[in-house]
Image (spheres, grey):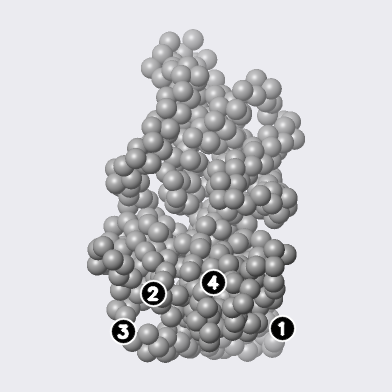
Amino acid sequence: MKIKRILFTMIVIIIGFVLQNGVFNQMTWTSIVPNILLMITCTFGFMRGRQTGILVGVVCGLLTDISLGGTFGINTLFFAYLGWFNGLFFKMFFMDYIVFPMLMIVLSDVMYGVYMYVVKILVNGRLNFGFYLSHVIIPEAIYTFAVTILLCHIILVINFKLEEKEKRSAAKFV
Amino acid sequence: MKKSRFSIPPRYLLFIITFICIAFFAIGFFAPGITDKVSDAISSVVMPMQKGMSNLSTSVSDGRDNITALKDAQAENEKLLAENERLKAELEKYEADQYELAHLREILALRDEYPDYDIVAAKVIQKDSGSWFNSFVINLGSDDGMKVNMNVLSGDGLAGIITEVGKNYSRVSAIIDDFSNISAMSQNSGDYCMVSGDLEAYENGRIRLGYIDKNDNIHNGDKIVTSNISDKYLPGLLIGYAEDIRVESNNLTKSGYIVPVADFDKLKTVLVIKTLKVTGGKS
């Protein structure tokens, strides 16, 4: 059962990576790309708890580092913390309450935006935070939110099914 | 009982990862060679995937085009539908060929413009996947003789510079990137200036032009090319045309904007100049 779960997680991450790099960044009408890997990290964080959140965050962060270039590890670090942060809300999460995950993901994306501004732009001497907030951070959060409505729900439903199955097979052995 | 195999407390897990990452930053800062090797090893596994993705997305956009073509055909007579579609598909193919031909001709013309340099054509296989950077990845790497700091041209002029080279890919940082700074000069007067990329200015299709002496002779519409004193860029590559030049409030320098000639939204094929700028020490 554990293998099934790991496989499911891997597939979700790979699909997310493909979507982000192959589909969404080809849409030429905007330079903003929804952050699907971040969404996956958050989802697994509050869905499965801190440990899974951190591990998924590391994998997603590594993939982001590869596709963005620059200093290696900057995204890995932050994604790991995001996974942990979302994992803190594990106990507050209920399957049928969809507003909460949405809120968490948007909040995480804004946090990621501010982090990126600080480590990448601010150190370069660009002080006009307002511009970056209104032209990069907020649009990215909105796009991610829009994509989340679709994808997050799918992940949650599949995870729910897997959990049901696990419970059933556990009950069988007792 | 089942969990005992993997149960590191999250706190320690986070601590370990933080430690590894910070150690990695430190190593990268003091001995960049080692971290480059690590990131290159990971990237060379993932990059073939990127190529596949690039093909996938092309087929996705092809599919989108086909749907619009179909809608046009449906408005026409039903009898002609099959015939129509066949012709359309054929036409589309020719149009694609034509487009490629025009593009390649453009590149050929550019190649003639800079005859002294050793130039190779490269394909753009990935655009930036985040919202913060303006870089792209091309399909040539160290196996094809790519090196860091090689200049990259698009159909019309300077597009960027190679910042990272892997075995089978290279990352090009575009001149509109927030981190890009180029020493440039006016082709007419030879006065020096600095071209720096800026996300904010690029919203209006421009990049910044600064550090011009008040008495220098740079005017709106002047051709701005890379300067001969730049340590990374070869001299005389066209960047764009000056615009909106004004004396700054300090009354000592002028600044303005450049309209870049390269079209960054539609980069498909680029040219890499394999000749590196020779500066003093190594050649």
- Give the amino acid type for the residue marked by disc 2 in the picture: Leu
Give the number of the mark in front: 1 or 3.
Answer: 3
> Is B272 situated above or below B166?
below
Badge 2 element = loop
Give the number of the mark in front: 1 or 4.
Answer: 4
At x 41%, y 19%, the residue is B6
Badge 3 element = loop
Do dots 1 and 2 share one subunit? yes
CA separation in Å, label 3 and label 2: 11 Å
- Give the amino acid type for the residue marked by disc 4 in the picture: Cys
CA separation in Å, label 1 and label 4: 56 Å
At x 68%, y 29%, the residue is A95
Badge 1 element = helix
**Residue ID for mark 4:** B193
- Return the x and y of residue A14 as percentages of the image width and height: 46, 46
- Give the amino acid type for the residue marked by disc 3 in the picture: Asp
Camera-side residue of B67 and A40: A40
**Residue ID for mark 2:** B234
Mark closer to the chain start, 3 or 2: 3
- Return the x and y of residue B273 as percentages of the image width and height: 35, 74
Mark closer to the chain start, 1 or 3: 1
> Is B222 situated above or below B202?
below
Q: Where the N terminus of chain B falls, by quadrant? A: top left
- Give the amino acid type for the residue marked by disc 1 in the picture: Ala
**Residue ID for mark 1:** B75
**Residue ID for mark 3:** B116
> Is B184 situated above or below B12?
below
Protein chain holding label 1: B
CA separation in Å, label 1 and label 2: 54 Å
Q: Residues within 10 Å of mark 4 (few under 14, many from 20)?
A: many
